[in-house]
């Protein structure tokens, strides 16, 4: 089964309106030559509508970095999946390590957010990954297994088609310290095996698994060469057009 590479840029809480639009325009201009890959950017909420307009007509999708697990109502400061869809987002990140570790999101909340997104017709990137302590204590697989089982609870095999997984070791995010190809290969094949157990071999083989954590133009080729790596979720290197273009264009 061939899986189309998927490169995504998570802008986090960076860039302002002008620099975000300039970045989106630079990507859109180059995207006319891209084939055989999916590309998405995840701007901050307040810029979503404008970035979606800047990318309209290009093949680049726009996603949100977070979503409420609730549909509507008295939830001050929250943004619903329907609102995201309304302003042009087609995807959402669920369970990013910064949401889990800085904002205390647990697997059950991540699962509720994932269902809110799928229910509104958005696709999802579900992020999983172990901390340095978990890796040192040999609990990488149980930790990721739990994030997968609880994160995907209640997701049907049909809906799994709208989910991408991102393996992001917490210790590799924003540190310049990326996981070795062997470490990445081990975890990606573990994830693929877990998915086959929860769903079916066929469904598991269709799911794309991105790697994230200090991905750069100079390491994307090596990472993409690892079995079961189907793309990347990029933070820091997605903030500058040349750096992100180097990743998108170096991926295949
Ligand atoms: P990084 O972030 O590329 O800056 O390490 C990755 C991420 O958090 O998705």
Image: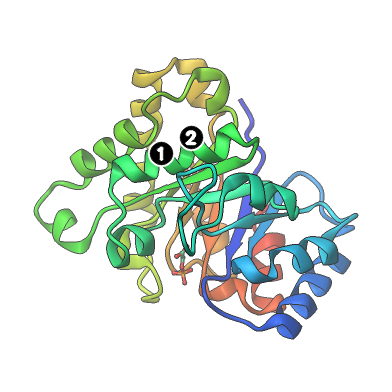
The residue lying toward the viewer, choosing from 45 and 38, is 45
Count the marks.
Answer: 2
Give the residue at x 73% y 49%.
86
What number is the disc on residue 112?
1
Up-down: is 110 above or below 190? below
Q: In which quarter of the view is residue 154 placed?
A: top left
Where residue 56 appears, as percent x and y from the top left, is 86, 57
Residue in the foreground of this view, choosing between 132 and 10: 10
Whole-number angstrom distance, CA of label 2 to CA of label 1: 5 Å
User: Which secondary structure, mark 2?
Assistant: helix
90 or 221: nearer the eye?
90
Residue 177 seen anywhere in this rendered image of the structure: yes
Q: What residue is shown with label 2?
A: 115
Q: Cβ(mark 2) to ligand 1 < 8 Å?
A: no
Q: Is residue 136 above or below residue 229?
A: below
Question: In the picture, residue 161 is in which quadrant?
Answer: top right
Instruction: Please tell me whether mark 1 sits on a helix, a strand or a loop.
Output: helix
Residue at the (14%, 61%) spot, across then down = 133
As drawn, is 21 to the left or to the right of 247?
A: right
User: Which quadrant of the rendered structure holds the N terminus?
Assistant: top right
What residue is drawn where x is 25% and y is 37%? 146
Q: Are marks 2 and 1 in contact (CB under 8 Å)?
A: yes
Residue 204 is situated, as x and y percent measured from the top left of the image, at 47, 24
Please tell me how crowded label 1 is: few (under 14), some (14-19), or many (20+) other residues with Cα within 10 Å.
many
Q: Position of residue 111 (x, y in %)?
A: 39, 38
Whole-percent x, y for residue 193 in the image: 36, 27
Q: Please identify the residue farthest to the front as the structure is shown.
A: 74
Q: Is residue 248 left or right of residue 216?
A: right
Return the residue nearer the eye: 116 or 61.
116
């Amino acid at each position: 089964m061939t899986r189309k590479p998927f490169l995504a840029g998570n802008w986090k809480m960076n860039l302002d309106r002008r620099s975000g639009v300039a970045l989106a325009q630079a990507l859109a201009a180059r995207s006319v030559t891209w084939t055989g890959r999916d590309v998405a950017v995840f701007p901050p909420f307040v810029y979503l509508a404008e970035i979606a307009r800047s990318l309209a007509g290009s093949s680049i999708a726009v996603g949100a970095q977070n979503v409420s697990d609730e549909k509507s109502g008295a939830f001050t400061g929250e943004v619903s999946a329907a609102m995201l869809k309304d302003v042009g987002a087609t995807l959402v990140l669920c369970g990013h390590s910064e949401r889990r570790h800085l904002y205390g999101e647990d697997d059950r909340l991540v699962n509720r957010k994932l269902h809110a997104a799928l229910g509104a017709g958005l696709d999802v990137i579900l992020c999983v990954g172990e901390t340095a302590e978990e890796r040192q204590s040999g609990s990488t697989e149980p930790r990721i297994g739990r994030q997968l089982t609880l994160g995907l609870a209640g997701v049907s095999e049909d809906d799994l088609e709208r989910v991408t997984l991102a393996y992001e070791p917490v210790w590799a995010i924003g540190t310049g310290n990326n996981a070795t190809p062997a470490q990445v290969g081990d975890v990606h094949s573990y994830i693929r095996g877990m998915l086959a157990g929860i769903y079916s071999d066929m469904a598991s083989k269709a799911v794309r698994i991105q790697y994230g954590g200090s991905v750069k133009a100079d390491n994307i080729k090596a990472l993409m060469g690892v079995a079961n790596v189907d793309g990347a979720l990029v933070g820091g290197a997605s903030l500058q057009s040349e750096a992100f273009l180097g990743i998108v264009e170096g991926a295949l």
